[in-house]
Amino acid sequence: MRQRLLLVLLLFSLSAVTAFAVPLLMSTASERTQQFVISRTADLDRFATLPADVVVSEALRYHEIYGEEVVVVNAAGEPVVEAGMKIAEVSAQIDAALRNQPAAPVPTVMPWSGGDVLFARPVGTGTKVAGAVVLRASTSVAALDVARRWAFVLAGALLAACACVLLALVVARWLLRPLKELDRGVRAVAEGQRRTHVADTAGPAELRALSESFNRMSDAVAEAADQQRRLIADASHQLRNPMAALRLRVDMLPSNGSLLTEVERLESLLDGLLALASAESTATERAAGGVEPELADLQVVAHDRVDAWRAAAHSAGATITVEDRAAGLVRCAVSDLAQVLDVLLDNAIKYGGPEITVICDRATLIVRDNGDGLSEEDIARATERFWRGDDSQRGTGLGLAIAERIVTAHDGTLTLRSDDTVGGLVVTVELPKEPLL
């Protein structure tokens, strides 16, 4: 944007300077040409009015002093004086003057002009022509004067152009510096810096107002993250105590099987909602500039969680195997990565087939089973909150939503697809990897 703005300003400035300088240059050349013509025409008029006995000495003296050539002839075309040139060289001009024909206009003298200009006029008045005068004048002096005047004009134009360039740079800096500050602030917020502020005292009023709005927004996002974190902590504390008391009273009631089942379901739903809120709080906290994400070893976490779920899988008639393809560290807290893997293993054990495979490949985690899988319509909705498949009515419908929110909060992706070869569901988690130093 800086280059485009500078280009527009410079083109406009240079166009304005050119529009001013070019007419001034041409006016200067025309003025000097007019002075040149008036001067030589006056000399012609003087020679035309001199008596015959004086014109010879005056023409020779003029040629000696100024170096310009003069020819004067009588009415018959016979030479009266030839000072520096012969009649034969200007016979056409003499004939035209004797016939009282108007002379051709003198071209405008330019700095590069050279050569001579012929001036001719008849001697006498009215229709009575008593002779003719021809003057050959050099344009070198006039061209030098034009060049000198043009040098002053061009120097002024150059100074004006430099001033315009400087002004364009100042204006561009004045306009774009606040935008650059805003860009820096947005990048800082995206990188996790809390309460990032930008200067709001430079640039036009509109940009200053925008900078002030950005500062308020940055503070509001950080405050929202703090409030959300406090809300989760308070809700976790305030809700679990009444739930524990309710569970204790239900256990004391006779024939409470169905009631206890509903309480357990309510506890599971509450845990899921708190986990989902915690995952969303992590995303908001990172956007507002939370703590730098931790690093986790994908293989270590995978083996640890598989060992923890192996007994549950055995009770469900399933086996879990781990494939280590390539080691790698990922930008994700160990607890969050473990929670994601718990959700995926829990779903695979409950709804998948008897064979479950966990694959670790650098920053990619894959959980595959050989069950019935999901249809394309179900896959599209699987990460929605409270969505449950036809055979999963005992679940809360929050597991995959929690896992997907945790992964995206760490700038990763969670995708589901059906395995076309052995059937079942394949869940792929890709997390940002820690670059090797």
Image (tube, rainbow, N blue to C red):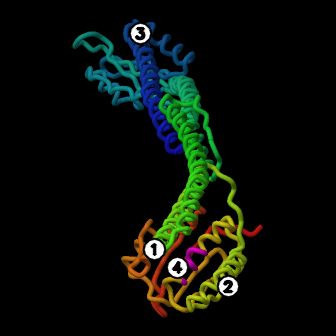
Residue type pointed to by label 2: Arg
What's the magenta region?
A: 342-349
Residue 418's x, y, as percent?
45, 84
* Labels 4 and 2: the sequence-earlier one: 2
* Labels 4 and 3: the sequence-earlier one: 3
Q: Is residue 49 left or right of residue 138?
A: left
Q: Nearer the viewer, mark 4 or mark 3?
A: 4
Q: Nearer the viewer, residue 229 or 243?
A: 243
Q: Nearer the viewer, mark 1 or mark 3?
A: 1
Q: CA distance from mark 2 to mark 1?
A: 47 Å
Residue at (59, 28) in percent of width and height: 201
Circle 4/circle 3 CB separation < 8 Å: no
Q: Which residue is mark 4?
A: 347
| Residue at the far front in the pictured view | 254
Q: CA distance from mark 4 to mark 2?
A: 23 Å
Q: CA distance from mark 4 to mark 3?
A: 118 Å
Q: Is residue 371 left or right of residue 180?
A: left
Q: Is residue 40 visible?
A: yes
In the picture, the disc for residue 258 is 1
* Labels 2 and 3: the sequence-earlier one: 3
